[in-house]
Image (cartoon, helix red, strand yellow):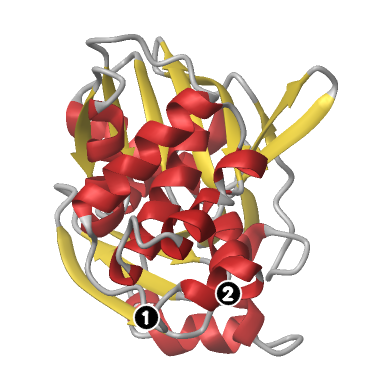
Amino acid sequence: MTSLVAVDWGTSSLRAARIGSDGAVLDARSLPRGILAVPPGGFPAAFGEICGDWMREPQAVALICGMAGSRQGWVEAPYCPCPANFADIASRLTWIEPGRIAMVPGLMCEHEGVPDVMRGEETQVFGALDLLALEDALLVLPGTHSKWVRVSDGRIAAFSTFMTGECYGLLRQHSILARTMPQADGELDEAGFERGVAYALRSGTLLHTAFSARTLALFDRLPASALPSYLSGLVIGEELAAQQVAQGSDVVVIGSEALTRRYELALRQLGASAQRAGWEATWHGIRAIASMLQGN
């Protein structure tokens, strides 16, 4: 493949990179043109806006991951069932323009008859495996909807979604807790965050622990500036309490530096360590999937 164009098209943002034959990122761009900002029928134009010049190369091929492959996106790419590896994903690409532009499928697994899905995160996972040379791993991709992923023999065996970031936002902005918190989150208060994690890990349920953010403020036992960090610790601690993380284990955390730092602190309370991978994992993942295509 002479030129690979990698596109990460999410709900709120659009990122693209031109990848060289050696896997290096030659150029990268981003636009605030997530799928929610694209009008009906506007996806080809938005795609051309960010990487049309790259696609003028005769041998260029674009692989697009993320929510652009959802029912609300450009073209719906059917989910690939777990377990799945690089080759399984590559064999289920949905071609928008045969041989030129394809959508990477998301993944689907089931827990006791209830489906769970991801779009875009699978590419980051495969990229992290490639970057860190791992065949077996436990990974977490924190965010609005955090994903915990188990990989065995290079295949995503199963995953679970936790609405951690969304729950934080709802409690932070739309519950009684918002009345005692500062307008902005501010910098992370590590002591307040770790206190929230510890309370969540020993106290059972967020339905109970969340109210402590109000009572600690009511009795001046936690400064207002630390409350957002404390609440963040509560919801992330609740997420970790649902995992089977053995003491001494290593968890791969994929995401921004700010979020990976929080999970690193939280995992420490379980006696586990964090191995970080940044957003560059997406480009490595797309390159790894592309390498499965004939002729690469």
Spot occupied by residue 108 in the image (x, y as percentages of width and height): 69, 33
Instruction: Identify the image quadrant of residue 66.
Output: bottom right
Which residue does the numbered mark 1 point to in the structure image?
184
Please tell me which residue is depicted at 51% across the width and 56% down the height of the picture: 215
* Residue 211 falls left or right of residue 187: right
Q: Is residue 259 above or below residue 179?
A: above
Whether residue 129 appears in this view of the structure is yes
List the residue tagged with mark 2: 173
In the image, farthest residue toward the front: 219
Seen in the image, is 168 located left or right of residue 278?
Answer: right
Residue at the (60%, 63%) spot, across then down? 171
Name the quarter where the C terminus is drawn: top left
Give, as a three-letter code, the residue at label 1. Answer: Ala
Percent of width and height locating residue 197: 38, 38
Which residue is more in the foreground, 7 or 227? 227
Q: Residue at x 34, y 79 (%)?
A: 30
19 vs 11: above or below:
above
- Of the residues shown, which amino acid type is indicated by label 2? Gln
Q: Nearer the viewer, residue 256 or 181?
A: 181
Mark on residue 196?
A: none
Of helix, strand and loop, which one carries label 1? loop
The CA distance from mark 1 to mark 2 is: 10 Å
Q: Residue 138 falls in which quadrant of the image?
A: top left
